[in-house]
Image: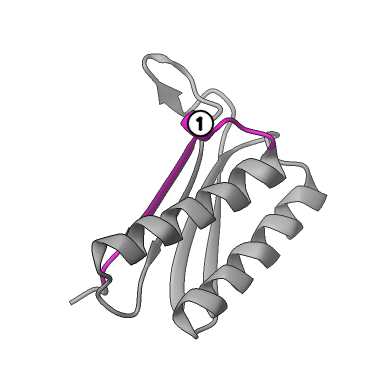
Amino acid sequence: MIPIMCIVQDGQIPAQTEVQLKTQIAEFAQRAFSAPAEIDWIVVPEGSGFTAAVPSTSIVASLHANRALPQDERTSLLKELTEICTTLTGRPAHEVVTSIRNPKD
């Protein structure tokens, strides 16, 4: 299982887009790590998330890999995950935060 945490602002992502994001992120996890995704979708109340001291419209997609990744593979996977998020949400890349961490100890 690949634990994935997605954080969005309330009202930011339409229900249909949420379903598409979850589906494509789950497909990404299966393709990249040969394991199913466990997506924790966290909705932050509007006005409760800030970037540079102003209300944030950023989204976060963060996951734990099931194996240690060499940097070149991590970079490629991060680009792919960011592309999924930017394409489906219409958010510019600077408003999409992605991370892929090595397995938990």
Q: Residue at x 58, y 48 (%)?
A: 83
Q: Quadrant of residue 77?
A: bottom left
Quadrant into which the C terminus falls: bottom left
Q: Residue at x 59, y 63 (%)?
A: 25
Q: Residue at x 38, y 14 (%)?
A: 53
Q: As displayed, is residue 4 above or below residue 97?
A: below
Residue 18 in picture, x, y percent from top left: 71, 52
Q: As displayed, is residue 105 above or below residue 46?
A: below
Q: Which residues are magenta?
A: 90-102
For numbered disc 1, what is the local secondary structure? Answer: helix
Look at the image and say whether residue 95 sits in the magenta stretch.
yes
Look at the image and say whether residue 103 sits in the magenta stretch.
no
Residues 46 and 8: in front is 8
Q: Which residue is mark 1?
A: 95
**Mark 1 is on which residue type?**
Glu
Residue 100 in picture, x, y percent from top left: 35, 60
Q: As displayed, is residue 4 above or below residue 11?
A: below
Residue 98 in picture, x, y percent from top left: 43, 48
Q: Residue furthest front?
A: 72
Q: Residue furthest bottom?
A: 34
Residue 39 in picture, x, y percent from top left: 54, 66
* Residue 6 visible in rendering: no
